[in-house]
Image: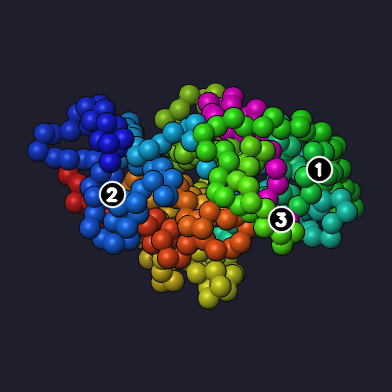
């Protein structure tokens, strides 16, 4: 707990909190006796946990953030999985906003593919069920260089997104989009040739003791140096800009319309059953790890969770803005945890349900309960 205490002291000073009130709910949450928290904290070195929690205060027209960290380290690598779909979705909306002939309702398909979609549908699928194909279609629209450069221009660094997700080609060139401009006219986007990614040089960039490749166990650490890189600080900064754009200078905001912004927020908190998915397979907590990741109960309508999760290679991550409209409270929470006890990758033997999801769900509940009591 040493790292947490050092950061707490700094955050406690800047928050100017009363001496009789410990506003560091993250410290209290991680000290919980609840076994879902305690078993992780008792063996913290095994789980590569990183957490950032933001308290939100309002004074007149100002929104004030106070961040509390636990082991957040941009140099300590974790695989971000589907969390990278969040910036891709936002930047796709920005691209549409700058193109007169396109809207979120424009219908299109990828050259050589048979699936027709709309940009609106892609954004919905990215957040409701974390669909890989929807993400990859938007990557074909943008290209990796555009994604990375535009995030850097907004002040969201460090970040490096270099590959599509799920079953896909490692092709550096994007595929053209065939876009329906009206009933009888189509437009075709030009392919984009992305640069060959430079290997990452970060702490813990190789992990475990082995991995499966083509059903063969390779007795070597798994190398993540060519994978996507999207640390906790960058995820959290993106979330702040999307939820509270007025807190940032114009150059740091995303250039999307009011209508696009409203749709993005709606997509971020809408659960799968409300957009037509089977609730038994895609229950409310399917992509809402904080508070509901370990249950299949419905999320009450007054609890709105605007977030993006990621889960792959034994790593679970959630980046969320949680708002209770009935109790009038809100806060931000981003966390990651690795659950790969045997140290083998691609064997599907990860402790998601046993350890990872219960930890993240209880972490969210612990902080939420404290927020309810905050003065």
Decide if residue 43 is in sight here.
Answer: yes
Out of 136 and 182, give the one closest to the viewer: 136
- Mark nearest the camera among 2 and 3 is 3
Spot occupied by residue 373 in the image (x, y as percentages of width and height): 19, 51
Out of 103 and 361, give the one closest to the viewer: 361
Residue shown at 58%/33% (left/top)? 159
User: Which one is earlier in the sequence, the residue at label 2 or at label 3?
Assistant: 2
Spot occupied by residue 75 in the image (x, y as percentages of width and height): 49, 31
Question: Mark 1 to mark 3: distance in Å?
Answer: 20 Å
Residues at discs 1 and 2 in contact (Cβ within 8 Å) = no
Question: Mark 1 to mark 2: distance in Å?
Answer: 43 Å
Single out the residue that lies furthest toward the front: 219
Instruction: Give the main secondary structure of the magenta stretch.
Output: loop
Q: Residues within 10 Å of mark 1 (few under 14, many from 20)?
A: few
Question: Mark 2 to mark 3: distance in Å?
Answer: 37 Å
Q: Which residues are magenta?
A: 146-167
Please, what secondary structure does the residue beneath circle 3 have? Answer: strand
Please, what secondary structure does the residue beneath circle 1 have? Answer: loop
Residue shown at 62%/32% (left/top)? 200
Please, what secondary structure does the residue beneath circle 2 have? Answer: helix
- Position of 90 compared to 2: left or right? right
Residues at discs 2 and 3 in contact (Cβ within 8 Å) = no
Out of 194 and 300, give the one closest to the viewer: 194
Single out the residue that lies furthest toward the left: 20
Q: Quadrant of the N terminus?
A: top left
Residue shown at 67%/57% (left/top)? 217
Q: Quadrant of the C terminus?
A: top left
- Position of 83 compared to 285: left or right? right
User: Which one is earlier in the sequence, the residue at label 1 or at label 2?
Assistant: 2
- Dot 3 corresponds to which residue? 213
Instruction: Specify the color scheme.
Output: rainbow
């Amino acid at each position: 707990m040493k790292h947490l205490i050092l950061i707490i002291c700094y955050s406690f000073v800047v928050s100017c909190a009363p001496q009789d009130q410990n506003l560091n709910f993250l410290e209290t949450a991680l000290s919980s006796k609840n076994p879902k928290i305690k078993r992780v904290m008792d063996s913290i070195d095994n789980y590569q946990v990183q957490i950032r929690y933001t308290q939100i205060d309002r004074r007149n027209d100002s929104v004030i953030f106070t961040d509390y960290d636990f082991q957040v380290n941009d140099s300590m690598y974790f695989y971000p999985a589907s969390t990278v779909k969040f910036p891709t979705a936002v930047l796709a909306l920005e691209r549409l906003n700058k193109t007169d002939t396109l809207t979120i309702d424009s219908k299109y398909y990828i050259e050589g593919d048979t699936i027709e979609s709309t940009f609106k549908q892609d954004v919905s699928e990215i957040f409701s069920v974390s669909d890989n194909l929807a993400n990859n279609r938007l990557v074909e629209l943008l290209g990796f260089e555009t994604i990375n450069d535009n995030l850097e221009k907004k002040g969201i660094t460090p970040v490096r997104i270099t590959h599509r997700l799920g079953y896909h080609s490692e092709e550096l060139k994007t595929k053209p989009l065939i876009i329906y401009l009206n009933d009888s006219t189509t437009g075709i986007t030009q392919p984009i040739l992305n640069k060959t990614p430079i290997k990452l040089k970060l702490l813990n960039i190789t992990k475990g003791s082995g991995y499966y490749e083509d059903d063969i166990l390779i007795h070597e650490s798994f190398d993540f140096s060519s994978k996507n890189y999207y640390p906790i600080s960058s995820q959290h900064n993106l979330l702040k800009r999307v939820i509270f754009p007025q807190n940032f200078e114009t150059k740091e905001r995303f250039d999307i319309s009011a209508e696009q912004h409203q749709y993005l927020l709606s997509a971020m908190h809408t659960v799968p059953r409300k957009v037509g998915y089977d609730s038994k397979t895609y229950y409310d907590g399917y992509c809402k790890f904080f508070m509901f990741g370990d249950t299949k109960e419905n999320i009450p309508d007054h609890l709105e969770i605007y977030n993006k999760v990621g889960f792959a290679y034994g790593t679970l991550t959630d980046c969320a803005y949680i708002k209770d409209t009935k109790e009038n409270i809100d806060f931000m929470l981003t966390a990651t945890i690795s659950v790969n006890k045997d140290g083998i990758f691609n064997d599907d033997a990860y402790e998601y349900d046993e350890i990872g999801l219960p930890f993240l769900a209880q972490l969210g509940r612990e902080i939420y309960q404290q927020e309810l009591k905050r003065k």
